[in-house]
Image (cartoon, rainbow, N blue to C red):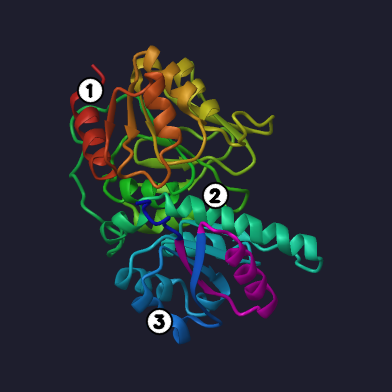
Amino acid sequence: MDRPVRTIRVFLVEDSITLRTALVQQIARDPALSMVGESSHPQEGQGRLLLLKPDVLVVESALFLPGGAGPLRALLQKQPMPVIAMGAEAWHESEMLRAGALCFLRKPRLAAAEDLNRFCGDVIQKIKIADHSTVARRRRTMAGDGVGYEWGSVGGRPFGGLVALGASTGGTQSTAQILRQLPADFPGMVIVQHMPPDFTRMYAESMDRECRMRVREARDGDEVRQGLVLIAPGDLQTRVKAQAGGGYLVQCAPGEKVSGHRPSVDVLFSSVAASAGAHAVGVILTGMGADGARGLLEMRRQGAYTLGQDEHSSVVYGMPREAFVMGAVVRQAGLEQIARLLMDYVKTHHRG
């Protein structure tokens, strides 16, 4: 006897009748999806939503943000689930990602039918990706006071190197979970998170408020310093270059997309391999595609310590999987272990 085909159960919160109707119709035509509920306002639909326990929640960000992102965060503490947020305002993205949304889709002008259909198709694609994520299993762990555990001071002599980290889909939450656990004197970090311009600045400002290390968007010529996290700016390729007198500088400049991205994790990792060699640590986290895998392999071949997020804790096990299969990862670990592994490594590999 054939087993019944599982469908992805979707709940939609959207106040636009036009978009809500179009999404409901397209989801009804997709055999992989089923619409279990819809609402024009989160408060009206919350009771049904908690009762129905959908696989994926799709929401209009403006409905949750009049009082900040707290309402969505509170909802996800009651009912962990992957969330796809939509919105017309650019600043909504950082707020919704901070609240726990898996991704954010910027609404285009939906005046033409073809634009509306294209956008609905993008939403459906993200629903299917979200259903393969592990957000639902990890949501309770990641929800909380935003501080996490601190593993104490690094102490002792300086590490003498730097930490490079790359992430994409689901990376804003994963990176945040790691950064919140690191002490104020942790070695300098450079991070590529696939995000468009302006969002990287907002994300950095958000992390600076929540972490013990200082966090800001990188600027061309910035020095990589202990206790500082530099987030690669959107739409600029970011590299690390060794200084003649010691230490490292960040270079942020326009350039072609590499591995489909700008900024690219491969570009960052390759530059770290060339400039820091064995005095570096590379970390590749959740994300679609393969960006960062080859660059991490270059880092490992130069003697760097490399970590990859495991499948169970990854929102999308794409980038870390490619790195692992390629042999670029010294150790693969769950998200909850990575901060501890970083602390252990820098404490035992001081500069002599």
Depth check: 78 or 68 in front?
Answer: 78
Residue 165, horizontal then vertical, whole percent: 41, 35
| Residue 131 x/y as whole percent | 43, 54
Q: CA distance from mark 1 to mark 2?
A: 31 Å
Q: Nearer the viewer, mark 3 or mark 2?
A: 3
**Which mark's residue is nearer the viewer, 1 or 2?**
2
Q: Of callouts 3 and 2, which one flags the residue occurring earlier in the amino acid sequence? A: 3
| Other-residue count near label 2 (Cα within 10 Å), few / some / many at <14 / 14–19 / ≥20 | many
Relative image position of residue 104 (x, y in whole percent)? 55, 58
Q: Which element carries disc 2, helix, strand or loop?
A: helix
- Between the C-alphas of marks 1 and 3, the distance is 53 Å
The image position of residue 99, as x and y in percent, is 42, 65
Give the residue type at disc 3: Arg
Q: Is residue 114 above or below residue 155?
A: below
Q: Which is nearer the N-term, disc 1 or disc 3?
A: 3
Query: What is the number of the mark on residue 218?
Result: none
- Residue occupying image coordinates x 52% and y 83%: 41
Q: Amino acid at mark 2?
A: Thr
Q: Which residues are magenta?
A: 8-32
Q: Which residue is mark 2?
A: 200
Secondary element at image label 3:
helix
Q: Is residue 200 left or right of residue 115?
A: left
Q: Which residue is mark 3?
A: 48
| Lower sequence index among marks 1 and 2 | 2
User: Is 28 a magenta residue?
Assistant: yes
Residue at x 58% of width, y 57% of height: 124
Is residue 250 among what the camera can see?
yes
Outermost residue on the front side: it is 1
Q: Amino acid at mark 1?
A: His
* Left or right: 327, with 125 as reference point: left
Q: Which residue is mark 1?
A: 349
